[in-house]
């Protein structure tokens, strides 16, 4: 999931020709214990919501 989110973000940045700042990442599901990959790709708060 994290890689597809990062890919879409980078694609949109390329498409617009500028960096698009991410203010928050919200995901549906239980919170993950290891957020290293998410924090590497997104330098913003990461929220998990139970759907």
Image (cartoon, rainbow, N blue to C red):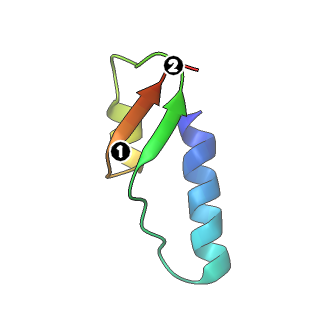
Q: Are marks 2 and 1 in contact (CB under 8 Å)?
A: no
Q: Are there few (<14), some (14-19), or many (20+) residues within 10 Å of tag 1? A: few
Of the pair 33 and 7, the residue shown nearer to us: 33
Farthest residue in the front direction? Answer: 51
Farthest residue in the bottom direction? Answer: 17
**Measured along the vertical axis of the image, is residue 43 above or below residue 13?**
above
Of the pair 23 and 19, the residue shown nearer to us: 23
Instruction: Give the labeled residue for mark 2.
Output: 50
Give the x, y percent position of residue 23: 38, 58
- The circle drawn on residue 4 is none
Determine the secondary structure under disc 2: loop
Residue at left offset 39%, top offset 34%: 47
Q: Quadrant of the N terminus?
A: top right
Q: Is residue 11 left or right of residue 36?
A: right
Instruction: Give the labeled residue for mark 1.
Output: 40
Determine the secondary structure under disc 1: helix
Give the x, y percent position of residue 44: 32, 51
Give the x, y percent position of residue 11: 65, 64
Residue at left offset 44%, top offset 28%: 48
Q: Is residue 16 left or right of residue 37?
A: right
Q: Is residue 5 left or right of residue 43?
A: right
Q: CA distance from mark 2 to mark 1?
A: 23 Å
Give the x, y percent position of residue 33: 33, 16
Q: Are there few (<14), some (14-19), or many (20+) residues within 10 Å of tag 2? A: few
Residue at left offset 51%, top offset 19%: 50
């Amino acid at each position: 999931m994290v890689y597809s989110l990062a890919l879409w973000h980078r694609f949109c940045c390329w498409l617009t020709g500028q960096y698009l700042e991410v203010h928050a990442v919200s995901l549906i599901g239980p919170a993950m214990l290891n957020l290293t990959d998410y924090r590497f790709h997104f330098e913003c708060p990461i929220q998990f919501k139970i759907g």
